[in-house]
Amino acid sequence: MADKKKKNLPPEAQSYQAFQDKREVKRPLLKNCIKAFLVGGFICFIGQIITTFYIYYFNFTEQTAGSPTVATLIFITMLLTGFGVYDRIGQFSGAGSAVPVTGFGNAVISSAIEYRTEGFILGVGSNMLKLAGPVIVYGVFASFVVALIKTILIKWGGL
Amino acid sequence: MNTFKSILFISFALLLIGCGPTPESQGNNNNIELNQISTTSNAIDQGPANQAKEYLSNYEEITSIKAVNTSKKLMIAIEIEHHERFGLANFREKRKKEMKEKFPNMEVDLSTDKKIVLELDRIEKALESESVTKKELEKALDKVIGLSKEET
């Protein structure tokens, strides 16, 4: 709850808030960070193995191996999401499984599976990007802003 | 909150350590992986490639050099120490410029891509075993140069 709202609460509610704050179970922040770091790192490690595999056995360079790697990782995520494994990984590692591309894949795929019962067009089609939509919107917007700043710095900042 | 602050501090410190500028040192590099291609009865004289290797081996950061040339083109691939990869693009551009100045009559290209290193290694081995003709070499090198130019 925001601090502004807390000030407007009646005294009983405020005293309860204080009472609850004392007894609330603390989040294991450091433990969560370590878990996220290790699992996220492990996902990236698998990604690196896939990239290296493509470089050694196919005609991909370090520059071009990125796209098939992402596609492969999303395909693996699709299978794990479908079999209900990925949400357990997410439960355990939190941001560690949400931040890499697999988390994005999971967000799209799980929505698609969930709304399958409502049909392909109005169910899957319209609800698939419900969760991933904001990521795309703010991703594109943020990159636009950064590009704008970079352009200004290069044109007039003499970088 | 304290743990959060300490994590933030540690990660920031690591970031600062990682992004520090690294001086480019020149000296004798003994543990470098390069083999001169014998220029006796090869399809095309590999003199320029060997010269390039000789010159680049003075850089301490470089761990392996592969180079192959035809009569008009020279392709070099280098690998550098892992912690030096922070300044990879900068290092590559500088060495590429040097190589272009050193071989003004040739089309010089320098790459740090692992794939190019592997492909040039394959061509070098074929040259060593003298199982490649002039035409095949030119074709193979063109393919590698094309590969290094790919962006997507």
Image (spheres, coloured by chain):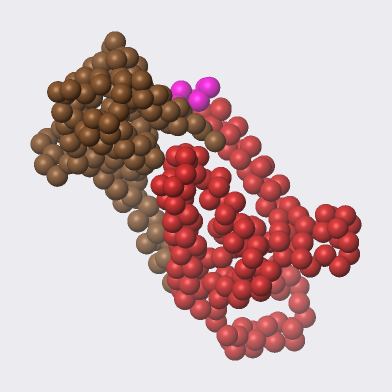
Chain colours: A red, B brown
Q: For the view shown, which residue lies furthest in the top direction?
A: B105
Residue in front for this viewpoint, B150 or B82: B150
Q: Position of residue B26 (x, y in %)?
A: 15, 33
Total numbered labels placed on residues in the image: 0
Where is the N terminus of chain A found, in terms of image quarters? bottom right
Pick the front one: A69 or B10: A69
Rendered view: A115 above or below A139: below
Image x and y of residue B114, in percent: 36, 41
> Residue B66: x, y in percent?
26, 34
- Say whether residue B96 is visible: no
Q: Position of residue B7 (x, y in %)?
A: 42, 65
Q: Is residue B112 left or right of residue A93?
A: left
Residue at left offset 22%, top offset 34%: B129
Does the magenta portion include A101? no
Q: Which residues are magenta?
A: A154-159
> Which part of the image, by quadrant, shows the C terminus of chain A?
top left
- Residue under the image location 28 percent in, 12 percent down: B104
Q: Quadrant of residue A2?
A: bottom right
Whether residue B125 is visible, yes or no, is yes
Q: Is residue A26 above or below residue B70?
A: below
Name the residue at 47% across, 40% down.
A59
Observer-nearest of B130 and B1: B130
Relative side of B91 to B56, left or right? right
Which residue shows up at 72% across the image and 65% down it?
A110
Residue A20 picture quarter? bottom right
Viewer-closest of B118 and B136: B136
